[in-house]
Image (cartoon, helix red, strand yellow):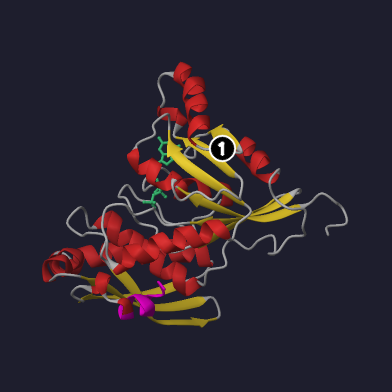
Amino acid sequence: MNPSNPDFRTGYIAIIGRPNVGKSTLTNHIVGAKVSITSRKAQTTRHRIHGIYTDADAQYIFVDTPGFQTQYDSALNRGMNKTVVDALHSTDVVLFVIEGTRFDSRDQKVVDLLPKDIPVILVLNKQDLVKDKDSLLPFMAEMNEIFPFAAIVPISARNGEQVPRLLTTIRSYLPVAEAMFDEDDITDKSERFLAAEMVREKVFRLSGEEVPYSASVMIEKFEQEGDMRRVFATILVDKENQKAIIIGHQGSKLKEIGTAARLDMERLFGGKVYLELWVKVKGGWADSERILKQLGYD
Ligand SMILES: Nc1nc2c(ncn2[C@@H]2O[C@H](COP(=O)(O)OP(=O)(O)OP(=O)(O)O)[C@@H](O)[C@H]2O)c(=O)[nH]1
């Protein structure tokens, strides 16, 4: 127990919601560092990521679940949905994020997964985009009919509006317990994992619509010598034409991806990074359980 605060609380919080509602943006805003990746494209977060935020009264340990996949059915997506469900049952509070004052059939699919034995807070994100503020109260009343939410909190993850209130609400559902992580721990994921996420984010951001979500990144080697890190990574794609897009004219796109990823790594790791990237074609990997295991999705 924290002797200076006998009511200090610590707990796990899962964030769930269909793709693109702003789950990563919310985690990043609270945790204050880029541990999870955001992108305009849906389905960019595949791993469970713990973001940790500690203040004088509580330690919030966030599990950022992957977007609940309702569209495709491959080994990867089945694994992702299982991760979502597992994450929910090992937490103290679940945040269910939806957009503004919209609730559609994809959100309903997520509601069907919500646990009945853990408090679920409904987060109405992107309030900055809601024009008709009068629609909020009736919408909240409607939402109360579809599930016994512990609380409903409208926020804007992008500008941080009402996020402190969300934290206070979450805290009231966390158990009284001492902190589990050092105060400046941002994530329990390894630098190796974060390096792969950063490369993957740049591939999505910089190679445009032609490269689908099947692109993945394997770290072949990660070495550290003092403050200097050497990262050797392979970008795996499905098809030859995707490989050509990622490499670009005379390697210009790959260079752009590499530079952007390296700068992000240097910022997060706090030291120089040497990054070497390759691109390989690996047909049909999304359906191969063996390769998924190698990549760490089990
Ligand atoms: N206007 C506005 N945009 C937001 C807000 N929160 C998130 N966004 C945007 O919505 C898009 C999706 O946000 P993400 O945080 O990647 O969404 P996600 O739910 O983690 O998505 P997946 O990883 O695909 O499951 C991004 O372009 C964000 O900038 C908000 O409060 N207001």
Camera-nearest residue between 44 and 29:
44
The answer to whether residue 255 of the structure is visible from this angle is yes
> Which picture quadrant has residue 78?
bottom left
Q: Is residue 55 left or right of residue 29?
A: right
Q: Secondary structure at mark 1?
A: loop
Q: Relative to 48, is 167 above or below?
A: above
Q: Is residue 119 left or right of residue 73?
A: right
Residue 156 covered by magenta stretch: no
Q: Dividing the image into 4 quarters, which one contains the C terminus?
A: bottom left
Residue at the farthest right position = 3
Tell me where the magenta segment starts and ends, as one range.
290-298
Crowd rating for badge 1 (residues with CA inside 10 Å; few <14, some 14–19, many 20+): few
In the rendered structure, which amino acid carries the disc numbered 1? Answer: Pro
The answer to whether residue 259 of the structure is visible from this angle is no
Residue 297 covered by magenta stretch: yes
Camera-nearest residue between 225 and 45:
45
Q: Relative to 207, is 195 above or below?
A: below
The location of residue 126, given as percent across then percent down, is 44, 34
Residue that appears at 47% across and 42% down: 97
Q: Which residue is mark 1?
A: 148
The location of residue 179, given as percent across then percent down, is 73, 60
The location of residue 2, given as percent across then percent down, is 83, 57
Q: Relative to 65, is 102 above or below?
A: above
Residue that appears at 46% across and 83% down: 223
> Which picture quadrant has residue 153?
top right
